[in-house]
Image: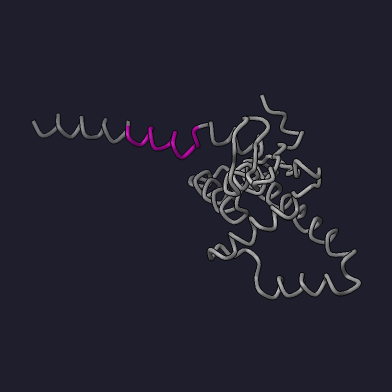
Amino acid sequence: MADPIKPLLIKRYASRRLYNTETSDYVTLEDISQFIRDGREVQIIDLKSGDDLTRQYLLQIIAEHESRGESVLPTNVLNDLVRSYTTQATSVVPEFLAASFEMLRDGQSKLLDNMTKANPMSAMPGMEAMRAQQEAFMKAMTGGIPGITPTKATEEAAEKPSPADENLDEIKAQLAELQRKLSTLGK
């Protein structure tokens, strides 16, 4: 069983092939991208020199996604990043970006929590479906950023039948009873 805290070690051979040390097989950039989307941290090491190549490969993955039209970074943000390499802002930018992503993860978690508990509207018919749609929207918007997962409250709410489902069953039973009575009246 893989340790989710310990980064997945990928070794780069002189042939530039990437080797997954957990599964003992070769992987592609797309495989590494999927590991990250699944919540794994990766570390890519050059086998010969021992250099850490993780940043280089992560940037390459981002560049490939951007070049395929899967744009996440607006042009003005990319321009600002390029400028930050030539200014005194280089010391501030990494902390700012890390804090921004942390706020995004926290904000989504709080939004999902608020939609399921401590919200008087959560008992309204149809609210469970709206919550599920909101959760799917947030997952799509964040692209599965690790750390942004459904909370225990949202998972429990998804497992329980909603009051709307229970009301629907009751309405169906009443309708069946009315149809039975109507059919006996017509005879």
In the figure, residue 17 lies in which quadrant?
top right
Residue 182 located within the stretch drawn in magenta: no
Across and down, in percent, residue 181 comes to 20, 31
Across and down, in percent, residue 127 comes to 53, 47
Across and down, in percent, residue 132 comes to 53, 45
**Total label count?**
0
> Residue extending furthest top?
1
The residue lying at 59 percent from left, 56 percent from top is 141
The residue lying at 38 percent from left, 33 percent from top is 169
Say above or below: 38 vs 177. below
The residue lying at 68 percent from left, 32 percent from top is 21
> Residue extending furthest left?
187
Residue 167 located within the stretch drawn in magenta: yes
In front of the other: 128 or 99 = 99
Query: Is residue 119 visible to the viewer in this orientation of the structure?
Result: no
Across and down, in percent, residue 52 comes to 79, 47
Q: Is residue 142 left or right of residue 82?
A: left
Q: Which residues are magenta?
A: 161-172
In front of the other: 108 or 46 = 46
Q: Which quadrant would the N terminus be assigned to in this image?
A: top right
In front of the other: 124 or 20 = 20
The chief SS type of the magenta part is helix
The residue lying at 72 percent from left, 50 percent from top is 105
Query: Is residue 173 visible to the viewer in this orientation of the structure?
Result: yes
